[in-house]
Image (spheres, rainbow, N blue to C red):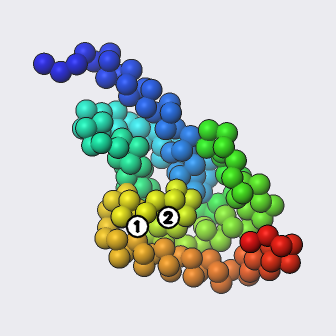
Amino acid sequence: MGEPKTDRDDEFQAFIVGAWPRLMRTAYLLAGEQYAAEDLVQSAAEKACATWGKVRRAGDPYAYVRRILVNQHARRWRRRPPELLVDAVPDAAGVEDGFARSDQRGALMAALATLPARQRQAVVLRHWEDLSDSQASAAMGCSVGAVRSHAAKGIARLREVAALKELKDMTHIGGAV
């Protein structure tokens, strides 16, 4: 017989409390709005809770739930057009990075909003989540080559955005990279 339900519930609760900030950040970058990100993470958490035994046996519960999150986002994207992203990105567990400190994050978020869903997913997973090509392909449910292609096309489109070109020029003038 399996372990008692309360132990599984406690284990799931501890996992989701710890993973929530990272999942929210990823969902926000994918969805573009706070309320949409919250809905996306809540939906992924519900699916993970319903199959928690399978999730924890997968070896990396966070990667499993992130895959659920990406799949949920893809389903929502197909049902309605993308929404414009806003200026602020929630910090992951209070950890601030260079992007969060940047005065130009609004321009970057607006440019990210212009990317098609798969390109945005690949850019977010590869460059914000810092996943390898194979990890991103597992999260997106596609081949490594598709991740590389989507990410390259997404980055190329971002490089063409005028506001981001100005940002790049400003960072070189100021001595930052």
Left or right placement of residue 79 versus residue 176 in this view: left
Q: Secondary structure at mark 1?
A: helix
Residue found 32% across the figure and 15% down from its top: 6
Residue found 46% across the figure and 59% down from its top: 131
Distance of mark 1 from mark 2, alpha carbons?
7 Å
In what quadrant of the picture does the C terminus appear? Answer: bottom right
Residue found 83% across the figure and 73% down from its top: 175
Question: Residue 151 in the image: x percent, y percent?
Answer: 48, 73
Determine which residue is flagged by label 2. 126
Residue 159 sits in quarter: bottom right
Instruction: Tell me which amino acid carries mark 2.
Output: Arg
Q: Secondary structure at mark 2?
A: helix
Left or right placement of residue 32 versus residue 172 in this view: left
Determine which residue is flagged by label 1. 133
Please say if 16 is above or below 159: above
Whether tag 1 and tag 2 are in contact, CB under 8 A, the answer is: yes
Residue 92 sits in quarter: top right
Left or right placement of residue 76 versus residue 9 in this view: right
Q: Nearer the viewer, residue 21 or 49?
A: 21
